[in-house]
Image: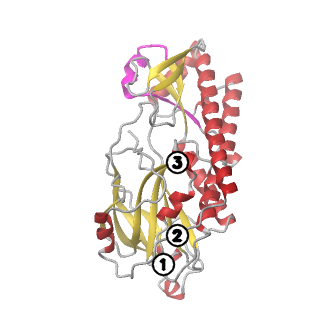
Amino acid sequence: MSPRHTRRRGTLTATAATLVTLCAAQTLTAAPSATAAPAPDRAAVHAAHSHSATASAVTAAQDRAARAIARSLGDAAWSTRLRTAALKSPEVPVTERASGPLKSRLAAADREIAEAKGLNTKTGSLLRLRLGDRSMRASLSAGTAPWVAATVSDDDATTVTAYDSQGRAHRLDARKAPARPVYVVDIDSSKALAAGLDVLREELVKDGVQSAAPGTVNTSATPKAAANAGFWTTKITAVELSDDEEPWIKGAAEIYTLVSGFGQDGKVRVDPVDMPYLDYDGTVYRPNQILVNWSNYKYNLADAVMMEEDGSTNYRDLAKAIAAVLLTITDQGAYIPLVNAILDAIPNDWWTDDPDYVDSWYTLAQSNKGTYYGARGNGWMTVEPYFVQQL
Protein backbone atom coordinates (compact mmCIF):
# COMPACT_ATOMS: atom_id res chain seq x y z
CA MET A 1 0.00 0.00 0.00
CA SER A 2 1.00 3.64 -0.17
CA PRO A 3 3.56 5.15 2.23
CA ARG A 4 1.29 7.42 4.24
CA HIS A 5 2.39 8.52 7.67
CA THR A 6 1.17 10.30 10.77
CA ARG A 7 1.32 14.04 10.26
CA ARG A 8 3.30 16.21 12.59
CA ARG A 9 3.49 19.96 12.35
CA GLY A 10 5.75 22.49 14.04
CA THR A 11 9.48 22.39 14.78
CA LEU A 12 10.97 19.01 13.93
CA THR A 13 14.54 18.01 14.64
CA ALA A 14 16.65 15.30 13.05
CA THR A 15 17.57 12.31 15.20
CA ALA A 16 21.08 12.30 16.59
CA ALA A 17 22.07 9.33 14.48
CA THR A 18 20.90 10.99 11.29
CA LEU A 19 22.73 14.21 12.01
CA VAL A 20 25.94 12.38 12.85
CA THR A 21 25.71 10.42 9.60
CA LEU A 22 24.98 13.46 7.47
CA CYS A 23 27.56 15.70 9.08
CA ALA A 24 30.41 13.21 9.14
CA ALA A 25 31.58 14.19 5.65
CA GLN A 26 30.90 17.88 6.09
CA THR A 27 33.47 20.43 7.26
CA LEU A 28 31.31 23.53 7.10
CA THR A 29 31.09 25.41 10.38
CA ALA A 30 27.75 24.84 12.09
CA ALA A 31 25.20 27.40 10.98
CA PRO A 32 22.72 29.15 13.24
CA SER A 33 19.23 27.69 13.47
CA ALA A 34 16.63 29.05 11.11
CA THR A 35 14.21 31.45 12.67
CA ALA A 36 11.35 32.49 10.49
CA ALA A 37 8.80 35.08 11.41
CA PRO A 38 5.27 33.68 11.16
CA ALA A 39 3.19 34.56 8.13
CA PRO A 40 0.65 37.32 8.62
CA ASP A 41 -2.55 36.11 10.31
CA ARG A 42 -4.61 37.11 7.26
CA ALA A 43 -2.46 34.95 4.96
CA ALA A 44 -2.63 31.98 7.32
CA VAL A 45 -6.43 32.23 7.63
CA HIS A 46 -6.79 32.52 3.85
CA ALA A 47 -4.57 29.48 3.23
CA ALA A 48 -6.43 27.38 5.79
CA HIS A 49 -9.81 28.38 4.37
CA SER A 50 -8.63 27.72 0.80
CA HIS A 51 -7.44 24.23 1.68
CA SER A 52 -10.74 23.34 3.36
CA ALA A 53 -12.59 24.63 0.31
CA THR A 54 -10.32 22.63 -2.02
CA ALA A 55 -10.79 19.41 -0.05
CA SER A 56 -14.56 19.86 0.03
CA ALA A 57 -14.77 20.67 -3.69
CA VAL A 58 -12.63 17.70 -4.75
CA THR A 59 -14.45 15.27 -2.46
CA ALA A 60 -17.88 16.47 -3.64
CA ALA A 61 -16.91 16.24 -7.31
CA GLN A 62 -15.56 12.71 -6.92
CA ASP A 63 -18.65 11.61 -5.01
CA ARG A 64 -20.98 13.01 -7.69
CA ALA A 65 -18.92 11.23 -10.33
CA ALA A 66 -19.14 7.94 -8.40
CA ARG A 67 -22.94 8.18 -8.13
CA ALA A 68 -23.28 9.05 -11.82
CA ILE A 69 -21.10 6.12 -12.88
CA ALA A 70 -22.98 3.74 -10.57
CA ARG A 71 -26.34 4.69 -12.11
CA SER A 72 -24.90 4.34 -15.60
CA LEU A 73 -24.14 0.66 -14.95
CA GLY A 74 -27.79 -0.08 -15.56
CA ASP A 75 -26.84 0.06 -19.24
CA ALA A 76 -25.71 -3.53 -19.88
CA ALA A 77 -23.52 -2.73 -22.90
CA TRP A 78 -21.70 0.11 -21.16
CA SER A 79 -21.33 -1.96 -17.98
CA THR A 80 -19.69 -4.75 -19.99
CA ARG A 81 -17.28 -2.35 -21.70
CA LEU A 82 -16.30 -0.80 -18.38
CA ARG A 83 -15.81 -4.23 -16.78
CA THR A 84 -13.51 -5.30 -19.61
CA ALA A 85 -11.50 -2.09 -19.32
CA ALA A 86 -11.18 -2.35 -15.51
CA LEU A 87 -9.93 -5.94 -15.75
CA LYS A 88 -7.46 -5.06 -18.48
CA SER A 89 -6.00 -1.83 -17.09
CA PRO A 90 -5.14 -0.69 -13.54
CA GLU A 91 -6.70 2.72 -14.31
CA VAL A 92 -9.46 3.60 -16.75
CA PRO A 93 -9.80 7.19 -18.09
CA VAL A 94 -13.54 7.02 -17.50
CA THR A 95 -14.44 10.52 -18.76
CA GLU A 96 -12.85 9.80 -22.12
CA ARG A 97 -14.66 6.45 -22.45
CA ALA A 98 -18.09 7.74 -21.41
CA SER A 99 -20.67 9.23 -23.74
CA GLY A 100 -23.89 11.22 -23.62
CA PRO A 101 -25.13 12.71 -20.31
CA LEU A 102 -22.58 10.71 -18.28
CA LYS A 103 -19.68 12.21 -20.21
CA SER A 104 -21.06 15.72 -19.59
CA ARG A 105 -21.38 15.08 -15.85
CA LEU A 106 -17.87 13.65 -15.60
CA ALA A 107 -16.38 16.47 -17.67
CA ALA A 108 -17.99 18.97 -15.29
CA ALA A 109 -16.48 17.11 -12.32
CA ASP A 110 -13.07 17.22 -14.04
CA ARG A 111 -13.29 20.98 -14.44
CA GLU A 112 -14.32 21.46 -10.82
CA ILE A 113 -11.40 19.36 -9.57
CA ALA A 114 -8.83 21.16 -11.72
CA GLU A 115 -10.13 24.56 -10.63
CA ALA A 116 -10.16 23.58 -6.96
CA LYS A 117 -6.55 22.37 -7.18
CA GLY A 118 -5.39 25.56 -8.89
CA LEU A 119 -4.43 23.70 -12.06
CA ASN A 120 -4.41 24.98 -15.62
CA THR A 121 -7.60 24.24 -17.54
CA LYS A 122 -5.41 22.58 -20.18
CA THR A 123 -4.51 19.82 -17.71
CA GLY A 124 -7.26 17.66 -19.20
CA SER A 125 -9.34 14.90 -17.61
CA LEU A 126 -8.17 13.84 -14.15
CA LEU A 127 -10.87 11.34 -13.17
CA ARG A 128 -9.83 7.70 -13.23
CA LEU A 129 -11.65 4.49 -12.36
CA ARG A 130 -9.96 1.40 -10.95
CA LEU A 131 -10.88 -1.84 -9.21
CA GLY A 132 -10.59 -1.36 -5.45
CA ASP A 133 -8.53 -4.48 -4.73
CA ARG A 134 -6.97 -7.38 -6.63
CA SER A 135 -9.11 -9.83 -4.65
CA MET A 136 -12.19 -8.48 -6.47
CA ARG A 137 -11.07 -9.56 -9.94
CA ALA A 138 -12.58 -13.04 -9.74
CA SER A 139 -16.07 -11.89 -8.73
CA LEU A 140 -16.04 -9.07 -11.31
CA SER A 141 -14.99 -11.52 -14.03
CA ALA A 142 -17.80 -13.86 -12.95
CA GLY A 143 -20.35 -11.11 -13.60
CA THR A 144 -21.08 -9.84 -10.08
CA ALA A 145 -22.56 -6.34 -10.34
CA PRO A 146 -20.01 -3.85 -9.02
CA TRP A 147 -20.68 -0.89 -6.76
CA VAL A 148 -18.90 2.44 -7.20
CA ALA A 149 -17.18 4.51 -4.50
CA ALA A 150 -15.14 7.69 -4.43
CA THR A 151 -11.70 7.36 -2.87
CA VAL A 152 -11.11 8.79 0.61
CA SER A 153 -8.20 11.05 1.56
CA ASP A 154 -8.34 10.38 5.30
CA ASP A 155 -5.95 7.60 6.33
CA ASP A 156 -8.01 7.04 9.48
CA ALA A 157 -11.32 6.51 7.69
CA THR A 158 -13.25 3.52 9.06
CA THR A 159 -16.04 3.37 6.47
CA VAL A 160 -16.44 3.95 2.74
CA THR A 161 -19.66 4.84 0.91
CA ALA A 162 -20.37 2.89 -2.27
CA TYR A 163 -23.32 3.24 -4.67
CA ASP A 164 -25.21 0.60 -6.64
CA SER A 165 -26.89 1.02 -10.03
CA GLN A 166 -30.12 2.15 -8.32
CA GLY A 167 -28.27 5.00 -6.61
CA ARG A 168 -28.54 3.41 -3.15
CA ALA A 169 -25.66 4.04 -0.73
CA HIS A 170 -23.89 1.21 1.10
CA ARG A 171 -21.42 1.52 3.99
CA LEU A 172 -18.29 -0.60 3.65
CA ASP A 173 -15.44 -1.35 6.04
CA ALA A 174 -12.48 0.81 4.99
CA ARG A 175 -9.93 -1.62 6.43
CA LYS A 176 -11.24 -4.86 4.94
CA ALA A 177 -11.89 -5.18 1.23
CA PRO A 178 -15.44 -6.45 0.54
CA ALA A 179 -16.15 -9.60 -1.45
CA ARG A 180 -18.30 -7.62 -3.90
CA PRO A 181 -16.27 -5.80 -6.58
CA VAL A 182 -16.06 -2.04 -6.10
CA TYR A 183 -14.97 0.48 -8.70
CA VAL A 184 -13.07 3.35 -7.12
CA VAL A 185 -13.29 6.83 -8.63
CA ASP A 186 -10.00 8.59 -8.08
CA ILE A 187 -7.79 11.32 -9.52
CA ASP A 188 -4.91 10.62 -11.88
CA SER A 189 -2.44 11.72 -9.21
CA SER A 190 0.60 11.39 -11.48
CA LYS A 191 -0.94 13.78 -13.99
CA ALA A 192 -2.24 16.13 -11.29
CA LEU A 193 1.08 16.20 -9.45
CA ALA A 194 3.14 16.87 -12.59
CA ALA A 195 0.84 19.75 -13.53
CA GLY A 196 0.72 20.91 -9.91
CA LEU A 197 4.47 21.11 -9.52
CA ASP A 198 4.64 23.26 -12.65
CA VAL A 199 2.10 25.59 -11.04
CA LEU A 200 4.02 25.49 -7.76
CA ARG A 201 7.24 26.56 -9.47
CA GLU A 202 5.52 29.33 -11.41
CA GLU A 203 3.74 30.69 -8.33
CA LEU A 204 6.86 30.55 -6.15
CA VAL A 205 8.72 32.62 -8.73
CA LYS A 206 5.83 35.10 -8.93
CA ASP A 207 5.93 35.43 -5.15
CA GLY A 208 9.69 36.05 -5.14
CA VAL A 209 11.09 32.56 -4.40
CA GLN A 210 13.32 31.13 -7.13
CA SER A 211 12.35 27.64 -8.29
CA ALA A 212 13.18 25.25 -11.12
CA ALA A 213 13.20 21.60 -12.11
CA PRO A 214 16.36 19.83 -10.81
CA GLY A 215 17.81 19.24 -14.27
CA THR A 216 17.41 22.85 -15.41
CA VAL A 217 20.69 24.51 -16.41
CA ASN A 218 21.45 27.62 -14.38
CA THR A 219 22.12 30.35 -16.93
CA SER A 220 23.58 32.57 -14.21
CA ALA A 221 26.15 29.97 -13.18
CA THR A 222 29.48 31.11 -11.83
CA PRO A 223 32.42 31.40 -14.26
CA LYS A 224 33.92 28.27 -12.71
CA ALA A 225 30.78 26.26 -13.40
CA ALA A 226 30.60 27.64 -16.93
CA ALA A 227 34.23 26.74 -17.54
CA ASN A 228 33.55 23.17 -16.46
CA ALA A 229 30.83 22.97 -19.14
CA GLY A 230 28.38 21.21 -16.87
CA PHE A 231 27.21 21.07 -13.27
CA TRP A 232 27.40 18.84 -10.21
CA THR A 233 24.28 17.15 -8.87
CA THR A 234 23.25 14.72 -6.17
CA LYS A 235 21.68 11.64 -7.72
CA ILE A 236 19.35 9.15 -6.00
CA THR A 237 20.45 5.62 -6.83
CA ALA A 238 18.05 3.85 -4.45
CA VAL A 239 15.15 4.84 -2.17
CA GLU A 240 12.65 3.06 0.05
CA LEU A 241 9.80 4.21 2.31
CA SER A 242 8.66 2.28 5.37
CA ASP A 243 5.52 0.20 5.73
CA ASP A 244 2.26 1.59 7.15
CA GLU A 245 -1.32 0.23 7.07
CA GLU A 246 -4.02 2.20 5.27
CA PRO A 247 -7.52 1.73 3.78
CA TRP A 248 -7.88 -0.67 0.83
CA ILE A 249 -9.66 1.99 -1.19
CA LYS A 250 -6.52 4.10 -1.55
CA GLY A 251 -4.25 3.55 -4.51
CA ALA A 252 -0.56 4.13 -5.12
CA ALA A 253 1.19 7.08 -3.51
CA GLU A 254 2.34 10.17 -5.39
CA ILE A 255 5.56 11.44 -3.84
CA TYR A 256 7.43 14.68 -4.41
CA THR A 257 10.30 16.39 -2.63
CA LEU A 258 10.87 20.07 -1.93
CA VAL A 259 14.61 20.75 -2.14
CA SER A 260 15.52 24.04 -0.50
CA GLY A 261 18.54 26.22 0.19
CA PHE A 262 20.06 29.56 -0.73
CA GLY A 263 20.39 30.40 -4.40
CA GLN A 264 23.36 32.01 -6.10
CA ASP A 265 21.77 35.39 -5.36
CA GLY A 266 21.74 34.65 -1.62
CA LYS A 267 17.95 34.33 -1.51
CA VAL A 268 15.97 31.29 -0.44
CA ARG A 269 14.89 28.96 -3.26
CA VAL A 270 12.68 25.86 -3.41
CA ASP A 271 13.01 23.28 -6.21
CA PRO A 272 10.14 20.72 -6.37
CA VAL A 273 11.17 17.25 -7.55
CA ASP A 274 8.54 14.83 -8.84
CA MET A 275 9.12 11.16 -7.87
CA PRO A 276 6.44 9.38 -9.94
CA TYR A 277 7.99 5.93 -9.56
CA LEU A 278 7.73 5.87 -5.74
CA ASP A 279 4.32 4.18 -5.57
CA TYR A 280 4.46 1.71 -2.69
CA ASP A 281 6.13 1.35 0.67
CA GLY A 282 8.38 -1.59 1.45
CA THR A 283 9.76 -1.53 -2.10
CA VAL A 284 13.27 -0.48 -3.07
CA TYR A 285 13.28 1.76 -6.15
CA ARG A 286 16.45 2.51 -8.14
CA PRO A 287 15.61 5.64 -10.15
CA ASN A 288 19.03 7.24 -10.82
CA GLN A 289 17.17 10.53 -10.46
CA ILE A 290 18.73 13.95 -9.95
CA LEU A 291 17.63 15.35 -6.60
CA VAL A 292 19.80 18.48 -6.22
CA ASN A 293 21.30 20.66 -8.95
CA TRP A 294 24.18 22.33 -7.10
CA SER A 295 24.69 24.99 -9.76
CA ASN A 296 21.54 26.62 -8.37
CA TYR A 297 22.88 26.93 -4.82
CA LYS A 298 25.27 29.28 -3.06
CA TYR A 299 26.28 26.90 -0.29
CA ASN A 300 27.41 23.29 -0.36
CA LEU A 301 24.32 22.26 1.61
CA ALA A 302 20.60 21.85 0.93
CA ASP A 303 17.56 20.35 2.64
CA ALA A 304 14.94 17.95 1.31
CA VAL A 305 11.33 17.62 2.51
CA MET A 306 9.48 14.62 1.07
CA MET A 307 5.70 14.97 0.75
CA GLU A 308 2.79 12.92 -0.56
CA GLU A 309 0.01 14.30 -2.74
CA ASP A 310 -3.37 13.07 -1.46
CA GLY A 311 -5.62 14.77 -4.00
CA SER A 312 -6.83 17.92 -2.25
CA THR A 313 -3.82 20.21 -2.64
CA ASN A 314 -4.27 23.62 -4.22
CA TYR A 315 -0.78 24.25 -5.58
CA ARG A 316 -1.21 28.02 -5.90
CA ASP A 317 -2.12 28.28 -2.23
CA LEU A 318 0.71 25.94 -1.23
CA ALA A 319 3.20 28.18 -3.04
CA LYS A 320 1.86 31.30 -1.36
CA ALA A 321 1.97 29.70 2.08
CA ILE A 322 5.60 28.60 1.63
CA ALA A 323 6.70 31.91 0.12
CA ALA A 324 5.08 33.92 2.94
CA VAL A 325 7.44 32.32 5.48
CA LEU A 326 10.60 31.72 3.44
CA LEU A 327 10.81 35.30 2.25
CA THR A 328 11.33 36.35 5.87
CA ILE A 329 14.59 34.36 6.03
CA THR A 330 17.74 36.16 4.91
CA ASP A 331 21.23 34.94 4.10
CA GLN A 332 23.42 35.39 7.18
CA GLY A 333 26.65 34.38 5.50
CA ALA A 334 26.33 30.73 6.53
CA TYR A 335 23.97 27.90 5.66
CA ILE A 336 20.63 27.87 7.51
CA PRO A 337 18.49 24.68 7.52
CA LEU A 338 15.06 25.36 6.01
CA VAL A 339 13.16 22.13 6.75
CA ASN A 340 11.41 23.50 9.83
CA ALA A 341 10.49 26.74 8.08
CA ILE A 342 8.84 24.85 5.19
CA LEU A 343 6.85 22.62 7.53
CA ASP A 344 5.82 25.55 9.71
CA ALA A 345 4.65 27.42 6.61
CA ILE A 346 1.85 24.94 6.00
CA PRO A 347 -1.36 25.86 7.90
CA ASN A 348 -2.50 23.52 10.68
CA ASP A 349 -5.54 22.06 8.95
CA TRP A 350 -3.51 21.03 5.89
CA TRP A 351 -2.18 18.19 8.01
CA THR A 352 -5.65 16.71 8.47
CA ASP A 353 -5.59 14.94 5.12
CA ASP A 354 -2.91 16.24 2.78
CA PRO A 355 -0.27 17.03 1.80
CA ASP A 356 1.25 14.26 3.94
CA TYR A 357 4.67 14.89 5.40
CA VAL A 358 6.70 11.75 4.69
CA ASP A 359 10.26 12.54 5.82
CA SER A 360 13.06 15.08 5.64
CA TRP A 361 16.80 15.14 5.11
CA TYR A 362 18.78 17.95 6.70
CA THR A 363 22.05 19.36 5.37
CA LEU A 364 22.64 17.22 2.31
CA ALA A 365 26.07 18.04 0.87
CA GLN A 366 27.39 17.77 -2.67
CA SER A 367 29.99 15.27 -1.46
CA ASN A 368 27.47 12.93 0.18
CA LYS A 369 27.77 9.35 -1.02
CA GLY A 370 26.01 6.45 0.65
CA THR A 371 22.75 5.66 2.40
CA TYR A 372 21.05 8.31 4.54
CA TYR A 373 17.97 7.79 6.68
CA GLY A 374 15.35 10.50 7.00
CA ALA A 375 15.00 12.48 10.21
CA ARG A 376 11.70 10.76 11.02
CA GLY A 377 12.93 7.28 10.18
CA ASN A 378 10.22 6.78 7.54
CA GLY A 379 12.61 6.17 4.68
CA TRP A 380 16.13 6.12 3.35
CA MET A 381 17.94 7.24 0.21
CA THR A 382 21.22 6.16 -1.30
CA VAL A 383 22.82 9.10 -3.07
CA GLU A 384 26.04 9.93 -4.89
CA PRO A 385 27.64 12.95 -6.60
CA TYR A 386 26.99 13.05 -10.34
CA PHE A 387 28.41 15.49 -12.86
CA VAL A 388 26.09 16.45 -15.73
CA GLN A 389 28.30 17.10 -18.76
CA GLN A 390 27.20 19.83 -21.14
CA LEU A 391 26.92 18.68 -24.77
Q: Residue at x 63, y 31 (%)?
A: 60
- The mark found on residue 35 in the picture is 2
Residue 133 in magenta? yes
Q: What amino acid is at disc 3?
A: Pro
Please state the horizontal and vertical placement of residue 184, each as a whole percent of the image: 51, 28
Label 3: few (<14), some or many (≥20) within 10 Å? many
Q: Amino acid at mark 2?
A: Thr
Q: Amino acid at mark 1?
A: Gly
Residue 244: x, y in percent? 35, 41
**Left or right: where 282 falls relative to 124:** left
CB under 8 Å between discs 2 and 1: no
Q: Secondary structure at mark 3?
A: loop
- Determine whether 213 is above or below 224 in the image: above
Q: Where is residue 116 drawn, in percent x and y?
A: 67, 42
Foreground: disc 2 or disc 1? 2
**What residue is rendered at 66% in x and 30% in y?**
106
